[in-house]
Amino acid sequence: MRIYLITIIILQLSFPVFSQVFWEKTDLPGLQTSNLIVNPSGLSAVSFYDLDGNESFYFSDNSGKTWVPMANPGNIADRMVIDQAGRIYVGDDDGLEVNLRRSTDFGKTWETISDTGTNANYALGVAPSGRIYSNFIFNRTGTHYMSWSDDHGDTWTKTKTDLPPVLLSNLNSQSGFLFDESGKVLYLGMDGVIGLDPETGKTEIKSTGMEAKSPITSCRLPDGTVLVFANFFSTVGHIYRSENFGESWSPLSPSGLPQFTAFYQLISTKTGVLYGIVAGTQSDGVYRSFDQGQTWENVSAGLGKDGFILTPQILAVTPDDEILCGTNDGLYRSTQVLTSVSDPDKLNPDNFRVSDAYPNPFNPETSVTVFLPEKGILSIQAIDLLGRVIQQFKTAELQAGEHTFNLGFSGSTSGIYFIKIQFGNQMLVKKVQLVK
């Protein structure tokens, strides 16, 4: 047995072991991310807060490649958006009242533009027309409104609604609103998806076919398809799809996600690649889908510090389809741009490669991504310290490209294991640690 173990170690050293790290840390402070936004031209803003609740703000005019400090707009900045001209809007909260503030000089100075007399402001959104939307808000008389401005926040139109109070539970300041080309608006409220007619101000629930009534996050794909994750307050959440901007919904049955998944955020690149912040009982992190949410893969490799896995807080996509991820330890940037399933780097990698297992250490599931240069037979096994094969995870003929596998060790005891991945006459070995 000992000879066999030595052989494994020699094999691990004899073949190159590639690490496919998806994220790299920016040079911004390693603090908790509270807001992150990128507008269609790449103007970006991010804010962080420390353990004492003090916030710091940064602005970028190049999609987050470089950053400069901004002035603090005032109190706790709950929501933040940037319009097409670069005006930055912040809804801040002093614990008693919410005010909207605006900067027209990229965060150098701020002015109060709406003393609304409200004590709730849960979302801001910028429509393609430039109209600024504020969510259902309520003042101290208990009246509920949807508000919008067509003059950059100087004046606001309020439409009263008789719908029940709706509270937004989103991490992304823009994921509460969705817009189509005709100007129609969808809003995510705790009671359901709500449609707003921008001409009449009429609001109505648009949840036909949606069994779960507590939407958390949403995104609109380039072809107009809308995806919503709902039912955050139950054990199992659901992803719903609409091809008619919320008139009707149908549930998806996605694969590749951890058990008991909750999506905190969904975003789409301009070519339809989906990214989501996922919380699950086995594997949290950032996941990616190339088929409109049907199948997902974990792309969290690189979101780590001192052996600990960081918690992703908020995502944003740049005009070049790079992904920014705010975490509990600062801001990270994606190291690769995969614009579609036809990306040549994805379909035809130059070498047989295997990513590091993630998470590692783990309990009871980890994952690896394999890059195949051509069609062939792939085998994945788990081997213990005595050289015994304890699990045969996969043996199949696969097409060239990138493949991600979730590897479960629920029946194994804590300890060190080796994952052996063989493709033709090539073999790579990854060392992993199961901690129960």
Image (cartoon, rainbow, N blue to C red):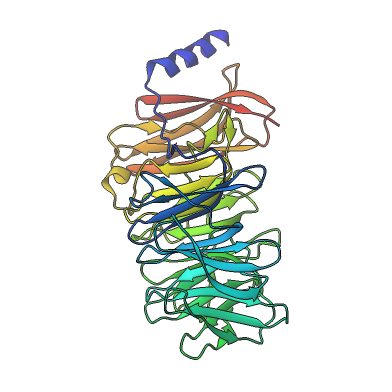
- Residue drawn at (70%, 58%) of the image: 235
Q: Quadrant of residue 364?
A: top right
Q: Is residue 304 above or below residue 298?
A: above
Residue drawn at 34 percent across, 43 percent down: 401
Q: In which quarter of the image is residue 42?
A: bottom left
**Residue most toward the bottom?**
200
**Where is the C terminus found, in terms of image quarters?**
top right
| Quadrant of image for the N terminus | top right
52 vs 90, left or right, is right
Instruction: Looking at this view, name the residue that lies furthest to the right.
Output: 141
| Residue located at (42% from left, 43% from top) | 333
Nearer to us in this view, 65 or 370: 65
User: Residue drawn at (61%, 50%), measured in percent from left and top?
Assistant: 279
Image position of 15 with respect to 92: above or below: above
Of residues 243 and 419, the one nearer the viewer is 243
Q: Is residue 349 above or below residue 343?
A: above
Q: Is residue 308 left or right of residue 296?
A: right
Q: Horizontal and vertical percent for residue 4?
A: 52, 12
* Residue 213 pos. (x, y %): 65, 72
Residue 13 % position (x, y) = 42, 15
Residue 69 rendering spot, x and y as whole percentages: 45, 46
